[in-house]
Each structure stands twice: as structure tokens, then as C-alpha cells.
Amino acid sequence: MKKHLIMLLLLAALLLLSACGGSPSADPEYTAPIVVGFSQVGAESDWRNANTRSMQTALSAANGFRLILDDAQQKKERQITALRNFIHQGVDYIVLAPTTEDGWDTVLYEARAAGIPVIIIDRMIYGEGQIGLDENGEPLFTCWIGSDFRTQGDKAVRWMEDTFGDEPLHIVHLQGNYGSSAQIGRTASLDAGLAANPHWTLVARDSGDFTQAKAQEIIGTLLARGVSFNVIFAENDNMAYGAIEALKAAGLTPGVDVHIISFDANQRALEMVLTGEISCNVECNPLHGPRVLEVIMQLERGETPPRYTYVEEGVFTIDGLTQDIIDSRGY
Ligand code: GZL
């Protein structure tokens, strides 16, 4: 008898607890989170990881969000599958960091048909032959936040012209993922620099896929073949790290025997600018989380955010760079 009484008292306590707001749907103060599906390129670089952390910090549960993160491992087809899953789940917003520029039209039409706003970050996408526009000139996305990669490349080339003057340069070019805006823009700048400076020679060009391992392999192979060069144009910091490892393994001193130009300006890379291993580093700022948060809150308020937002970015060399500056940076 006593056992049953205890069971009844326990059951009453549980019912009382659940009536006091145990289940969110019963709580009138409960506000459903804003659900965001985020298709991320991958985790190929320090830049990418900083970008992911920035998004997770901004679109946190504490800020009223449920963030669904999909890592595409640098494969576009996985991103397209992720977007279709987000559409099927009926998320409130889609954020896409596109691997490459082309091939998004169909799935973005599907997102628009589902009434889901799409925010593009970092790299650009193409519509039907236009940058981010469909065949009717209508945007395939609600807004875009990212970098001007051609300007980044031009900053690097200008530094090379100002620094090396008439000195003959023999350049090894480590490219990022073919077809990504970062690779397209940065490569176009170097090509323009090569055309404008006849005393510059392109010794070798290959894709390191923005990864340290592939870059180290490319530089190591060139050195083993006895290829001579005095500049490495690395389209991101992780490839610069790989190049530095390969140079050191061959007994060469980065910044003395070979000058390295890099992109992203991660803290780890800026330490290498201080030591002289990297000669010039062009910033590519990954901290898009707060920018996306602001855009979503504008849309939630019924406001119209700018269609395109370019991020302000600088150039780092050893001149004027201090440990305090490096330590104060967010990535
Ligand atoms: C640039 C970004 C690039 C970085 C790389 O905005 O797309 O991809 O430069 C990253 O580090 O892998």
C-alpha cells in the first residue's frame, strides 16, 4: 500500500512540474528560435575555422538561434544536398559559403520557391551568366557579405612592385580551389602583374586547394627537381605554412632565399610576418558572424539590408606590425 502511495505522490509531482513550464510549448513567454541552415565549405584552413567559429558565436542559442551547420568537405555537391535538406526542414534562413561560383541556380530557385531567404557569405556565386543574378536579372540570393578578392590580389602585386622594383622575380604560384572567387580574383591580379612586369617570370603554378599539406608537397617537389625561384605567391596562409615547411626542409630561409606573399592574415601567419618568414600578408577577414546576425535581424524587422556588403581589409608587412596588434585581432 505504502509503495503505491509513494508512486502516486511521485506522479503528482511530475505532473505539477510539467505544468510549471517543463515543456516550452506550454510557456507563454517561450519564443521559438530562428532556425538557420549554414552550408560551410569545409575545414580546410585556419580562415575557414575562424569563419565557422564566428558564425557559431553570433548565431547562438543565447542569441535566439538554432544553427544547423553542414561541413561540405570542399565538395559542391554536398552543399547542394545540404541546401535541399534545409529547404525540406523548412529552416527560416539559409547561409551559404559557396565552394565555387557556378552551379547554384537550380537549388537557389528551389529555396526562393520555398520562401527561404538565402544569405551568401565570403565567395561569390554566378546566376545565368551574371554575378548572382538569374536570367531575368533577379538576384538568386537576398544579400551577400564577403571580400573583394581582385582588390586583395592587386594589393599584393602593388607591394611586390613597390618592394622589388626592377629586380627579376621568379615566381611560384600556389592557387586555391579552382573556380572559387578567392582563387579567381587573386590569380587575375598576379596575371595582370606578370603582364605589366616583363622582368617577372612565372616558374610554376599549381593548386594547393588552400591546404598546407598540398602546398608543402608542391614546393618540396619543385625543390627536389632543382627548380629555382625567389618568390612564392600563396593564395592563403595555410599554403604559405606548407611552403615554409618545404623551404626549411631544403635548408632554405624563408624571407631571405625566397619571399612569400600570402592572404588571410591569420594570427599564426602574422607571427611569421614578425619573424620575416612571410614578407607580405593581405587580410581576408572571416568574421562574418556578426554581419550575418545584423542582416537577419534587419530582415526580421522587415527592413531591407544592402544587397552586397564588402568587408574592409588591410595589408600587413613587418613595418608597423607589433605583437599587440596581432594579439588584438579576432582570428
Ligand atoms: C577567402 C576564403 C578562402 C581563404 C582560404 O574568403 O574563401 O578560403 O582565403 C579559405 O583560407 O580556405
Image (cartoon, rainbow, N blue to C red):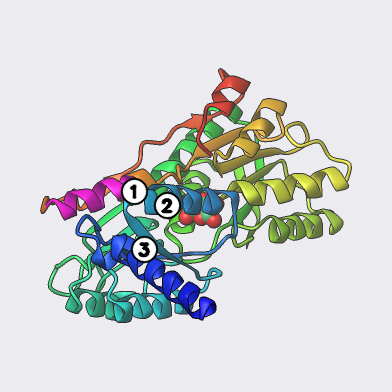
Q: Quadrant of residue 206?
A: bottom right
| CA–CA distance in space, label 1 to label 2 | 12 Å
Three-letter amino acid code at disc 3? Leu
Residue 14 location, x and y as percent?
40, 69
Task: Using the rendered image of the protein, determine whether residue 191 is visible from the camera's viewpoint.
Answer: no
| CA–CA distance in space, label 2 to label 3 | 35 Å
- Residue identified by numbered label 2: 55
| Pointer 1 residue Cβ closer than 8 Å to ligand 1 | no
Q: Residue at x 24, y 66 (%)?
A: 26
Three-letter amino acid code at disc 1? Asn
Mark 1 falls on what kind of element?
Answer: helix
- Residue identified by numbered label 3: 17
Residue 99 location, x and y as percent?
46, 66
Q: Residue at x 48, y 76 (%)?
A: 7
N-terminal-most mark, 2 or 3: 3
Do the CB atoms of the residues marked 1 and 2 lie less than 8 Å apart?
A: no
- Answer left or right for 113 relative to 45: left
Residue 285 location, x and y as percent?
45, 42
In the displayed structure, 28 sits above or below 75; it is above
| CA–CA distance in space, label 1 to label 3 | 27 Å
- Answer left or right for 198 relative to 272: left
Mark 2 falls on what kind of element?
Answer: helix
In the displayed structure, 149 sits above or below 177; it is above
- Residue identified by numbered label 1: 63
Magenta stretch, residue numbers = 291-301
N-terminal-most mark, 1 or 3: 3
Q: Residue furthest front?
A: 1
Three-letter amino acid code at disc 2? Met
Please identify, in this view, whether the residue under mark 1 or under mark 3 is nearer the observer. Answer: 3
| Pointer 2 residue Cβ closer than 8 Å to ligand 1 | no
